[in-house]
Image (cartoon, rainbow, N blue to C red):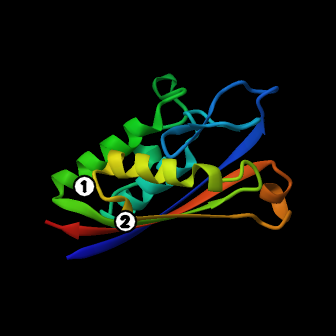
Amino acid sequence: MFRIGQGIDFHKITTKETNPKPLILGGIEIESNYTIIAHSDGDIILHALSDAILGALGEKDIGEYFPDDIQETKNLDSKIILKKTLEIAKEKQFIIQNIDITILSEVPKIKPFREKIKKNLSILCNIDTQQIAIKATTTETLGFIGRKEGIGCFAIVLLRKL
């Protein structure tokens, strides 16, 4: 049995002059003059991926497990969110077959970090890098992403029942 899930996440971005918090994508720190404004660490990749997994499992979204209006989740490392999500998948006897990620961003440029993100996701999810696709696109200066006010991520995951 296979299950498909989709997850989406968007966050505001700002310069590090305004907010010195590190920019985290796919569980790694990205060198950039920009950072994400979020209650947690703002890792849009791990948030979208976690929601995709939960969706494939027929579960509620990450906000149910990690609400953004409580102090306990303030600056939360999103690897904890993914770990909990993978535990739920394991309990239901599902494993990841493949992951397809698309990042929408004018800044930072993703290409220099793509392979590092992919490698880290393979470690976090215990799958081969060949099972992960990471793509990035801009909005050609359109909208809040084009104005460098935000960043977004779409994740699709295929799970297989053990």
The residue positioned 63% from the left and 30% from the top of the image is 22
Q: Which residue is mark 1?
A: 89
Asked if residue 83 lies left or right of residue 62, the reply is: left
Q: Could you tell me the amino acid type at mark 2? A: Gln
Q: Is residue 26 above or below residue 67?
A: below
For mark 1, does the 10 Å Cα neighbourhood hold few (<14), some (14 to 19), or many (20 or more) residues? many
Asked if residue 160 lies left or right of residue 26, the reply is: left
Q: Which residue is mark 2?
A: 130
Q: Position of residue 123 (x, y in %)?
A: 34, 46
Q: Is residue 97 above or below residue 150?
A: below
Q: Quadrant of residue 43?
A: top right
Indicate the quadrant containing the N terminus: top left, top right, bottom left or bottom right: bottom left
CA distance separating discs 1 and 2: 21 Å
Q: Position of residue 121 (x, y in %)?
A: 41, 50
Quick one: label 1 or label 2, which is nearer the N terminus?
Answer: 1
Q: Position of residue 78 (x, y in %)?
A: 46, 38
Secondary structure at numbered mark 1: helix
Query: Given this view, does label 1 or label 2 mark the residue nearer the observer?
Result: 2
Res 47 seen here:
no
Depth order, front residue of 24/128: 128
Secondary structure at numbered mark 2: helix
Res 57 seen here:
yes
